[in-house]
Image: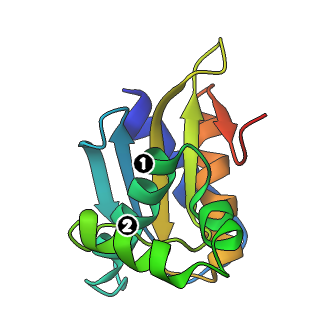
Amino acid sequence: MQARQIIDGAFVKARAMRMEPLTVVVLDGGGNVVAAEREDGCAPLRYAVAKGKAFAAIGNGASSGVVGQRNAERPAFLASVAAASEGQFIPVPGGVLILDDQQCVIGAVGASGASSGEDEAAAVAGIEAAGLAYGIEPD
């Protein structure tokens, strides 16, 4: 139910901002796909990118953009994590952590199709639409 609300909320935000068509993927705390949807007109590779953004966030405990930014000067680390995740690691903005009432990570959302900043805004909007909190960077 909440995964569906996240996807719907992300799409509402995307249409309000007139973004390019998106793909949104919701992962649980173990990195498993709970729900995913691709808007009409969204390129098929966007699913793998959205999933990789969400996986980068859940796998590292920070948004995918923060993971990439923090490790920009560590290309060997980024390459190693990408290899360890079998290519399911996309460290650019668009992957956002889902938090529960106690601020514990319970999943992640990845969005892909528009600019990275727009993808992140859609992911955040989706999480908020489901009545959940989001995490960009740990405290």
Characterize the local packing of mark 1: few (<14), some (14-19) or many (20 or more) Cα atoms within 10 angstroms: many
Q: Residue furthest left?
A: 86
Where residue 32 sits in the image (x, y, percent)? 24, 42
- Under circle 1, the secondary element is helix
Would you name the residue on which mark 2 appears? Answer: 81
- Mark drawn on residue 91: none
Number of numbered tags placed on the structure image: 2
Q: Is residue 137 above or below residue 117?
A: above
Amino acid type of disc 2?
Answer: Val
- Contact check, label 2 and label 1, Cβ < 8 Å: yes
Tell me where residue 30 appears, x and y as whole percent.
30, 35
Three-letter residue code for mark 1: Gly
Q: Is residue 82 left or right of residue 67?
A: left
Q: 14 above or below 36?
A: below
Element assignment for label 2: helix
Considering every residue shown, the one lying at the far top of the view is 102
Q: Is residue 49 visible?
A: yes
For discs 2 and 1, the disc positioned in front in the rendered view:
2
x, y percent for residue 36: 30, 54
Observer able to see residue 39:
no
Q: Residue at x 48, y 72 (%)?
A: 77
Q: Would you name the residue on which mark 1 appears? A: 59
